[in-house]
């Protein structure tokens, strides 16, 4: 069942003013949920979609944990950018969270590792969770590389020299961090989320001089935001799927059966006998998330299992924010916005 506030997109999102670039993870979670619901059982991609959905959900709850200490920071002092992906000579580099003050930059690498994380020799990191072992990149060299690339990127853009610090934050309080042997040293930059605020306060003491003006701080933040290159968000391409691979029809909002039947301006579920007046809205949202925001009457009928172009037209006129073209070539724009 969907537990989401759905609004037709009419105004800009409202968020804390110091968050220059918010996360858009809810959108990704919704797309994966829609995909999971519409990829038939037994399809070769089904398991991968479900695994990725689990990972994404852990990311969302991990990031929520990290947002808590960040919420205590002085809003006038810090500008925050989440999920930044910048191009450089070596491709792209991605940073989970960047804090920009007039004194320093902090890159926060968030690790949503559940279970026990063991730091071994030669920068080896092993996570044990639910009886399974998995190796990971050491977060400190990873974040140092990001810091180096960000330093070079900023220099190239002519930004004055700002010190860059890194922290690798283990988001879940239940995660156990330990060395593989007493000789192994866990770097100081690896911390539990509960220490994040205090470590930032230590950095404030270390960097007590402003190196850029308030105006420069705003300019750098917007330069970073405007240079963001998000990865292609075509989810079907990512899983090598075609719209024909997806299950069509309107899901029953009560029992999740497929498909509901259109009768007397309502949707009827033959399984649980539930009636709905707007169940098509979630199906059109699935279309927007999985295929795109432009839809024709014909494509909508195929996706919603509606035979009448007139009924479809009425629904599209109600649900869409704009349209272009004429007659059969008319394309409607879906503008559902998921509140973050
Ligand atoms: Zn039902």
Image (cartoon, rainbow, N blue to C red):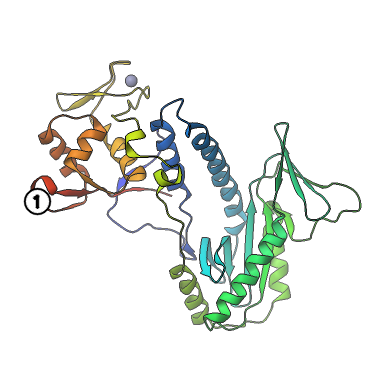
**Relative to residue 79, is residue 299 drawn left or right?**
left
Residue 140 in picture, x, y percent from top left: 72, 60
Residue 15 in picture, x, y percent from top left: 43, 58
Residue 7 in picture, x, y percent from top left: 31, 46
Task: In this rendered view, identify the residue nearer to me: 52 or 190.
Answer: 52
Residue 184 in picture, x, y percent from top left: 87, 53
**Relative to residue 130, is residue 327 drawn left or right?**
left
Give the quadrant of residue 162: bottom right
Task: In this rendered view, identify the residue nearer to me: 259 or 209.
Answer: 259
Residue of label 1:
326
Categorize mark 1 by other alpha carbons within 10 Å: few (<14), some (14-19), many (20+). few
Give the quadrant of residue 310: top left
Asked whether mark 1 lies closer than 8 Å to ligand 1, one says no
| Vertical relation: 190 (above or below) 157 | above
**Relative to residue 202, is residue 285 drawn left or right?**
left
Q: Quadrant of the N terminus?
A: top left
| Vertical relation: 332 (above or below) 247 | below
Q: How many marks?
A: 1
Q: Which residue is situated farthest in the left direction here?
A: 327
Q: Residue at x 56, y 69 (%)?
A: 78
| Vertical relation: 198 (above or below) 299 | below
Find numbered disc 1 in the image and state the secondary structure of the residue it sits on. loop
| Vertical relation: 37 (above or below) 223 | above
Q: Residue at x 63, y 77 (%)?
A: 103
Quick check: which quadrant has ligand 1? top left
Q: Which residue is situated farthest in the right direction here?
A: 183
């Amino acid at each position: 069942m969907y537990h989401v506030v759905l609004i037709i997109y009419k105004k800009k999102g409202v968020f804390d003013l110091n968050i220059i670039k918010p996360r858009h993870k809810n959108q990704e979670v919704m797309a994966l949920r829609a995909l999971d619901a519409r990829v038939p059982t037994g399809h070769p991609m089904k398991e991968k979609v479900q695994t990725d959905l689990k990972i994404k959900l852990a990311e969302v709850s991990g990031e929520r944990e990290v947002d808590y200490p960040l919420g205590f920071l002085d809003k006038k002092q810090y500008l925050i950018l989440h999920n930044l992906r910048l191009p450089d000579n070596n491709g792209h580099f991605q940073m989970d969270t960047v804090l920009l003050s007039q004194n320093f930059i902090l890159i926060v690498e968030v690790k949503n590792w559940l279970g026990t994380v063991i730091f071994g020799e030669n920068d080896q990191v092993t996570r044990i969770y639910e009886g399974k072992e998995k190796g990971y990149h050491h977060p400190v060299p990873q974040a140092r590389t990001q810091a180096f690339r960000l330093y070079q990127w900023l220099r190239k853009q002519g930004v004055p020299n700002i010190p860059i610090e890194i922290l690798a934050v283990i988001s879940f309080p239940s995660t156990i961090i330990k060395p593989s042997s007493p000789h192994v040293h866990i770097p100081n930059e690896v911390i539990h989320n509960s220490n994040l605020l205090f470590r930032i306060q230590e950095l404030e003491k270390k960097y007590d001089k402003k190196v850029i003006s308030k105006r420069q701080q705003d300019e750098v933040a917007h330069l970073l935001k405007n240079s963001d290159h998000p990865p292609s968000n075509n989810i079907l391409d990512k899983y090598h799927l075609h719209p024909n691979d997806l299950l069509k029809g309107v899901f029953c909002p009560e029992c999740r059966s497929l498909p509901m039947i259109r009768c007397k301006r309502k949707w009827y579920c033959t399984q649980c006998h539930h009636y709905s007046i707007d169940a098509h809205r979630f199906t059109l949202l699935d279309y927007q998330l999985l295929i795109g925001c432009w839809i024709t009457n014909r494509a909508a009928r195929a996706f919603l299992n509606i035979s009448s172009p007139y009924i479809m037209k009425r629904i599209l006129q109600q649900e869409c924010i704009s349209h272009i073209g004429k007659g059969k070539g008319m394309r409607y724009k879906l503008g559902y916005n998921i509140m973050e």
